[in-house]
Image (cartoon, rainbow, N blue to C red):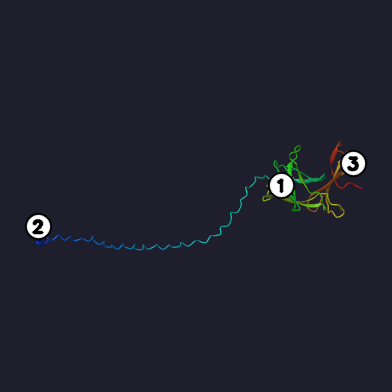
Amino acid sequence: MPFVFASALLTACAVPPTALPTTTSTLPPTATATATPEPSPTPTSTSTSTPTLAPTNTPPPTPTYTLVPFPGFSVMFDYYKGWIDGDQTHFYFLNSRIPDRVYGLVEGTHEIVCDPDPTYPYHMECLSDFTEWDQSYLDFTFYADEAHTQEVYKQVYYTEFGTDQRYIPVDCEAEYRIYDGKCYYAITCYDQYGNYLYSMDNIPYGGHFEGYSAPCPP
């Protein structure tokens, strides 16, 4: 019995081993690196500089003034008298016949504002804030507008504000009249500019006028 077991064992050992299947390991596919395309540089548009135009010097518009309707002083317009009251000088003119305010300058410097006399609107009174007059002959310039752009009249007047009366050139007009058989005179005096200065007469206006005469006998 042991012999049989040994024999069988030897037989078993003598059987050639069955070849085991060989396992072939398949390697995973090697990843092929795909080159990433480089971005093509997009050409930047060249900025074209637009030349800046040099500013042109445009002169400012010339101011235009609205013409003030002005009918003009009457042909009998004349200076009458002046006086100082407090801190103002009053100049009174006859026969202006202007219904509205008029502006002016005395001696080209001192402003006056003139309005129709409320009581006698054919005449006008001008006021000035200046009172230190040192001469009698004053240059008056009148304007229709407050801005003094529209000159309407200019004249030199004797105002009696000066202190020296000896050198006032005068030209007097005299006429002689007969009243009730007696001769009387009426004298009106003007300066070298034709401005009225003063008048005097001894005419008896209640008498009976008989006509004009040559100069009365002394």
Relative to residue 29, is residue 42 drawn left or right? right
Indicate the position of residue 32 as horizontal and vertical percent values.
26, 62
The quadrant holding residue 61 is bottom right
Q: Is residue 62 above or below residue 70?
A: below
Distance between the alpha carbons at the discs numbered 1 and 3? 49 Å
Element class at badge 2: helix
1 and 3 marks in contact (CB < 8 Å)? no
Q: Amino acid at mark 3?
A: Lys
Q: In the image, which is nearer the foreground, mark 2 or mark 1? A: 2
Q: Amino acid at mark 1?
A: Tyr
Q: Kindly tell me whether residue 10 is visible in this rendering.
A: yes
Indicate the position of residue 78 as horizontal and vertical percent values.
76, 46
Q: Which residue is mark 1?
A: 103
Relative to residue 165, is residue 54 drawn left or right? left
Q: Is residue 179 above or below residue 21?
A: above
Distance between the alpha carbons at the discs numbered 2 and 3? 215 Å
Q: Which residue is mark 2?
A: 2
* Sequence-earlier tag: 2 or 3: 2
* Sequence-earlier tag: 2 or 1: 2
The quadrant holding residue 185 is top right
Indicate the position of residue 95 as horizontal and vertical percent values.
74, 43
Q: Residue at x 85, y 43 (%)?
A: 177
Relative to residue 197, is residue 146 drawn left or right? left
The label shown at residue 182 is 3
Pick the residue in front: 63 or 69: 63
* Sequence-earlier tag: 1 or 3: 1
Specify few, some or many for label 1: CA neighbours under 10 Å numbering under 14, 14-19, or 20 or more.
many
The label shown at residue 139 is none
Pick the residue in front: 50 or 11: 11
Q: Kindly tell me whether residue 186 is visible in this rendering.
A: no
